[in-house]
Structure formats: structure tokens, C-alpha cells
Image: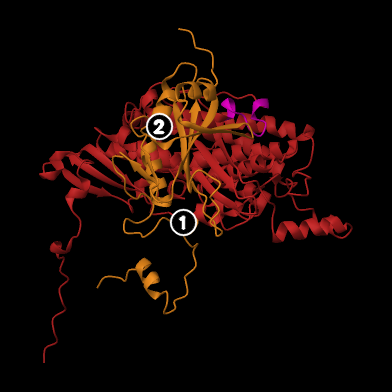
């Protein structure tokens, strides 16, 4: 059995999914392919199963929030980014497949049927960033308590300190702080 | 008058708010009718190595399904890092995987160095390799001790901790701290090796091989140990890959993937060492792979000590845009004062871009995803931690085994809950 020579993942994905690829970014020897969220499972499956690519190991799923005080995520494709870091053991190289998701409905199809390892990583992204992975078998919080309100890793979620209570914001604060049950 | 009788404490089962329906689809249908038993293991069970909770569905003593529940040790380290400048955040990373803090420091520093393109001098790289391999040995010793004590071998635990203490003493010489040293900094390490460090390291390398033989004499040929571990918790190579298993647990299944070899960092390509592999992927192979890894780490340490004599450069980069100047410069150079002030008040800026780096920690692949903002604080840091992936894979190994075997399996994949929950 011979091993197929390595092919360029960007060219291969562009040839197969010409409409799904939105951007390609090279930075510090890392390649990022930004794709259409709806096409993500197809792209990942293609990258895993095609000769010359064989990205057979899912390293990480990281979600990032581009919100900031000035509200300047306008020049990006969406408020949230979800990066899938996949690795090819055969050709010893990494690839980042990234999707951008809108603020109103951050939903992306799950890839748990392609990589079972994505199960908890997707739950973590849901828990921390509020990304919804449609089709996930068990979309529940994993690190935070089940009754937690909000998604802590969003940039508009305050870090650590207590908000000072005034009459104008007390209702907003009490919403986040349920009293202990008798 | 007779005093009131003390009020009896009553357990009111009707107050239980939970429902089996929450578990529908996660446990078998037999649990719904009460044919199998649902048993809670942890989070305070000693053999779950920290605060891991497992919900077990049992048919007699056999595990039908196993649902891990994590998050009890979640401390929001990633969120906290977003509010700190890059150099200050290094101290937080120590607290994730508290058995090998140096690996966490390393992966975070490497991510920063990649993001801002900061070079590390050769000597600093060698010092880093020494620290990484020492912490690999220390972490494997804790694993060995706790794994053995789970299976009833008390003495190995005491011996392993005795040797680990020697390593912690060396870490104290380096950084002033036994465990959470924060010794690695962007661009190198905090300070140079102390004069007493190398004699201590040489002495350690002299006594350790004999001690390792002692452990092996106690365990490897021990019929009880072999009975308890061989053929237990088998995970096939393709299944292990699909579930994201990495490190020694993956290599025990026969997959030759060590990031030190595959994507060398910190000069690992210049060291001679072997990657031990297992065949069956059971608990015994995971044990053997880790024992041999300790021997390989000592091989690397011997070479690193030789390299120290010839390695060029200092213990930290001279790039003053990222690395503060030493104290001695402050009295003589105005520029040094400015750099010192800027770096300790504001820190350095990193581009609004993302990088991902990963290294081989004692537990497996630890990865760091770092996204800058263009300013002095990161936008997002995400650690891909090996324990998180390994706990996810425990049900795959455990289903169909007895509860006693589950204890062996949890011990063998070497999980740290601080690493998992972050």
C-alpha cells in the first residue's frame, strides 16, 4: 500500500466547495480556512477522508467572541468565531477550519458524528460562549453549574466583580442572582 | 416539665427534584424500569483522583454505562487571563495542571512567543527542556504512586513521593517555589540556574535508575498487579484517535505520536530518545509506557546537562520590547528605565491574530489557542487539555468492566481534574 502524496488542503477544499470557502488566512505558518457554517461538517468530513489530506485527529475547538466596548466586530463576518484545529498524523501538519457566526443566532452543525471527541469540546463552547451546535446528542452545560445564567466567556460578561446595585439596575442584577431556596 | 425530645432528622424523598428523564438516551432503557442500578461515584471518592463524579449504571457489578460529570474545579482561569497582560497571566497557568505546572507555562509562553515573534536563546531552551523533563518525571511519579495505591500497593506510593520530593527541591532552587514556580516567562526563564542546581540534578540522575528498578520489582512482575491490569480497559488505536486520546495513553495503544518528535519545539530535535509504545492498549501497557518514559526523560536530562556547557545566549531573550531589563542596567541606562516602566505597567502588545501551539505534556497533548487584541491583553485564551479529552474517553474503556476495574482505568489514564476543569 502506498501513501498518496500530500496535497494542499486549501486548493483541495476550494476545488470541492468553491462556494463554501469565504476566506483563507496565513499567519505564522498556520493556515486558516474560513468556511460557511452550514457546510462545515461536509468540509471537515472531506478533509478527514480524502487521500492526500487525512486530517484524522481533532485537537481542539475554540470559540472566540469579537465583541468589544465600541461594538466593532463590524468588519468581521460575525460576532463569534469557532476554530476547529485538526491535525493530520500521516502528513504531520495542522489546519484550522474556522466559521463566523452572527450574534442573533450563533448556530453551527455539530461534528460529533465525524469526530466523537468533539462532543465535550462543543459542550464547552456552548457553556462558555453560547454557541449552539445543532444536532449535538447532549447539548448541556459541562463546566458551569446547570442553573447558571449567561455564558461567561463572552466579552460582554463582566469579570469577577460585583455590579453595584442602584434602584435603576436592581432588577437586572437580581435576574443573575437567584436567592437561596428556603 | 419534660424537655422536648430532640427533633428527629427526617429525609424526605419527595423533595428530590431530579428526574430520570434527564438521563434518557444517556443510560440504557433498563435503568428507567429499575432493572439496572444507578450509582453515584464521587466527587469525593478517593480513587477518582480529585473531584471527578461518575454516574454509573450497574448490572450487578458490571458497568453498563458510565457518565462522567466534570466542572467541580472550574476556576475561570481562561476568563481571568483575558484581564491580565501577557506576562502576568503566566502565573495563572500554573494552577491548571498542578502536577506539571512547567508544561502549562511552556505552552502558554510558546503561544505568546509565536504571536509576537519572540526568539528564545539556546541556553534558555535547554533550561526549559531540563524543567519539562523533570516535571514529566515528577508527574509520572505521582501518577505511579496514586495508581498503585488505588490497586492496593501502598509502599509504591510512599517511595514515589520520596523521589518526587527531590525534584520539588530542585524546582525550589530554580524558582523559589516547590510547585507553582511560574519559572517560564515569555522569551526564556525567570532567572539563571542556581549553582546548587546542577549538583542536585546529577545526584538525582545517579540514584533514580535504581529506584525505578525498585518500583518495577514491586509491580511489573507482581502477579496481583498483572492480573488487575492486563486486558483491562482496552482502547483500540482508531477508537483512541477518534476520541482525541493523546500522550502515553495513545502510545500504549500502539500509535506512534509524540509531539516532541513530530513537531519538535525548544530544540527537542537535537536530543536522542525513543518513544516507548504499547501493543494492547490496556492498563498494563499504559503503565509500562509511562515507566519507560521516565527512563527516556533521564536520557534527555543527561544530554541536556552536556548541552548547557556549549549552549549560546543567556537564560532570557535580550529583546527589550518584550523582556524587562535586568536590575543592573537600571542604574546606568535611561532606555532600560523606560523599558522597565513600560513593561511592568502596560506590558507589550500582540497583534489581533490567532495562533495555536501544542506540546507534549506528561499527560498528552496540551494545546493553547491564543487570540490577541492588538493591545496588551489577550482576547481569548483556550487551553486544550489532555485530561478533558481523556475523561471523555473513560466510558469507552470502562463499559463492560467491573467497578474495581474502573478504578484501575481511571488511574491508568492519568487524569488531573484541575487540568480538565481549568
Q: Position of residue A146 (x, y in %)?
A: 32, 55
Residues in magenta, as a range = B260-270
Residue B6 position (above or below residue B75): below
Say if the magenta span includes residue B86.
no
Residue B24 position (above or below residue B18): above
Q: Which chain is orange?
A: A
Which residue lies under the disc numbered 1? B75
Which residue lies under the disc numbered 2? A39
Q: Chain of mark 1?
A: B
- Give the residue drawn at x 77%, y 34%: B311
Q: Colour of chain B?
A: red
Residue A143 position (above or below residue B148): below
**Circle 1 SS class:** loop
Left or right of residue B57, residue B197 in this image: right
Residue at the farthest right position: B332
1 and 2 marks on the same chain: no
**Circle 2 SS class:** helix
Say if the magenta span includes residue B269.
yes
Q: Chain of mark 2?
A: A
- Give the residue drawn at x 41%, y 21%: A49
Location of residue A173 by image quarter: bottom left
Q: Position of residue B341 (x, y in %)?
A: 76, 60
Tell me if I can see residue B221 in this picture: no
Identify which residue, B157 or B147, lies in the foreground.
B147
Identify which residue, A121 or B302, lies in the foreground.
A121
Q: Name the front one of labels 1 and 2.
A: 2
Q: Which mark is residue B120?
A: none
Q: CA distance from mark 1 to mark 2?
A: 35 Å
Discs 1, 2 touching: Cβ within 8 Å:
no
Amino acid at each position: 500500500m502506498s501513501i498518496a502524496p500530500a496535497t494542499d488542503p486549501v486548493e483541495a477544499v476550494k476545488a470541492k466547495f468553491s462556494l463554501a470557502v469565504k476566506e483563507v488566512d496565513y499567519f505564522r505558518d498556520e493556515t486558516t480556512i474560513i468556511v460557511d457554517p452550514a457546510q462545515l461538517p461536509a468540509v471537515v468530513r472531506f478533509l478527514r477522508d480524502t487521500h492526500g489530506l487525512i486530517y484524522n485527529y481533532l485537537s481542539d475547538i475554540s470559540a472566540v467572541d469579537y465583541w468589544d466596548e465600541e461594538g466593532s466586530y463590524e468588519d468581521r463576518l460575525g460576532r463569534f468565531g469557532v476554530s476547529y484545529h485538526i491535525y493530520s498524523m500521516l502528513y504531520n501538519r495542522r489546519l484550522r477550519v474556522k466559521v463566523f457566526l452572527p450574534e442573533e443566532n450563533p448556530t453551527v452543525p455539530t461534528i460529533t458524528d465525524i469526530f466523537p471527541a468533539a462532543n465535550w469540546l462543543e459542550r464547552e463552547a456552548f457553556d462558555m460562549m453560547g454557541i449552539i451546535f445543532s444536532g449535538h446528542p447532549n447539548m448541556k452545560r459541562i463546566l458551569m453549574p446547570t442553573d447558571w445564567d449567561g455564558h461567561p466567556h463572552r466579552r460582554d460578561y463582566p469579570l469577577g466583580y460585583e455590579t453595584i446595585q442602584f434602584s435603576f439596575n436592581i432588577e437586572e442584577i437580581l435576574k443573575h442572582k437567584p436567592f437561596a431556596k428556603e | 416539665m419534660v424537655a422536648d425530645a430532640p427533633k428527629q432528622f427526617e429525609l424526605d424523598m419527595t423533595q428530590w427534584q431530579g428526574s430520570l428523564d434527564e438521563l434518557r438516551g444517556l443510560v440504557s432503557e433498563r435503568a428507567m424500569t429499575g432493572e439496572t442500578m444507578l450509582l453515584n461515584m464521587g466527587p469525593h471518592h478517593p480513587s477518582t483522583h480529585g473531584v471527578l463524579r461518575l454516574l454509573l449504571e450497574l448490572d450487578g457489578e458490571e458497568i453498563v454505562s458510565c457518565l462522567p460529570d466534570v466542572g467541580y474545579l472550574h476556576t475561570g482561569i481562561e476568563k481571568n487571563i483575558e484581564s491580565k497582560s501577557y506576562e502576568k497571566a503566566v502565573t495563572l497557568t500554573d494552577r491548571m495542571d498542578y502536577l506539571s505546572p512547567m508544561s502549562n507555562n511552556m505552552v502558554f509562553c510558546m503561544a505568546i512567543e509565536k504571536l509576537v515573534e519572540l526568539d528564545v536563546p539556546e541556553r534558555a531552551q535547554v533550561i526549559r527542556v531540563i524543567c519539562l523533563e523533570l516535571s514529566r518525571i515528577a508527574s509520572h511519579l505521582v501518577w505511579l504512586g496514586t495508581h498503585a495505591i488505588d490497586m492496593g500497593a501502598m509502599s509504591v506510593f510512599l517511595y514515589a513521593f520520596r523521589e518526587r520530593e527531590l525534584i520539588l527541591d530542585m524546582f525550589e532552587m530554580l524558582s523559589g517555589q516547590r510547585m507553582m514556580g511560574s519559572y517560564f516567562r515569555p522569551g526564556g526563564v525567570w532567572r539563571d540556574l542556581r549553582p546548587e542546581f546542577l549538583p542536585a540534578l546529577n545526584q538525582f540522575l545517579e540514584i533514580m535508575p535504581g529506584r525505578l528498578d525498585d518500583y518495577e520489582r514491586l509491580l511489573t512482575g507482581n502477579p496481583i498487579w498483572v492480573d488487575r491490569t492486563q486486558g483491562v480497559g482496552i482502547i483500540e488505536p482508531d477508537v483512541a484517535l477518534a476520541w482525541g486520546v493523546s500522550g502515553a495513553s495513545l502510545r500504549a495503544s500502539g500509535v506512534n505520536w509524540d509531539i516532541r518528535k513530530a513537531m519538535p519545539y525548544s530544540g527537542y530535535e537535537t536530543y536522542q530518545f525513543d518513544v516507548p509504545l504499547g501493543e494492547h492498549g490496556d492498563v498494563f501497557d499504559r503503565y509500562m509506557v509511562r515507566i519507560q518514559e521516565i527512563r527516556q526523560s533521564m536520557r534527555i536530562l543527561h544530554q541536556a546537562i552536556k548541552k548547557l556547557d556549549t549552549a549560546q545566549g543567556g537564560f532570557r531573550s535580550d529583546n527589550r520590547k518584550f523582556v524587562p531589563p535586568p536590575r543592573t542596567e537600571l542604574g546606568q541606562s535611561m532606555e532600560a528605565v523606560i523599558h522597565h516602566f513600560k513593561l511592568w505597567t502596560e506590558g507589550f502588545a500582540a497583534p489581533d491574530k490567532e495562533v495555536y501551539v501544542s506540546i507534549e505534556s506528561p499527560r498528552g497533548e496540551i494545546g493553547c489557542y491564543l487570540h490577541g487584541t492588538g493591545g496588551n491583553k489577550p482576547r481569548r485564551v483556550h487551553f486544550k487539555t489532555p485530561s478533558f479529552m481523556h475523561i471523555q474517553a473513560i466510558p469507552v474503556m470502562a463499559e463492560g468492566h467491573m467497578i474495581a476495574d474502573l478504578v484501575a482505568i481511571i488511574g491508568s489514564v492519568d487524569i488531573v481534574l484541575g487540568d480538565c476543569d481549568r
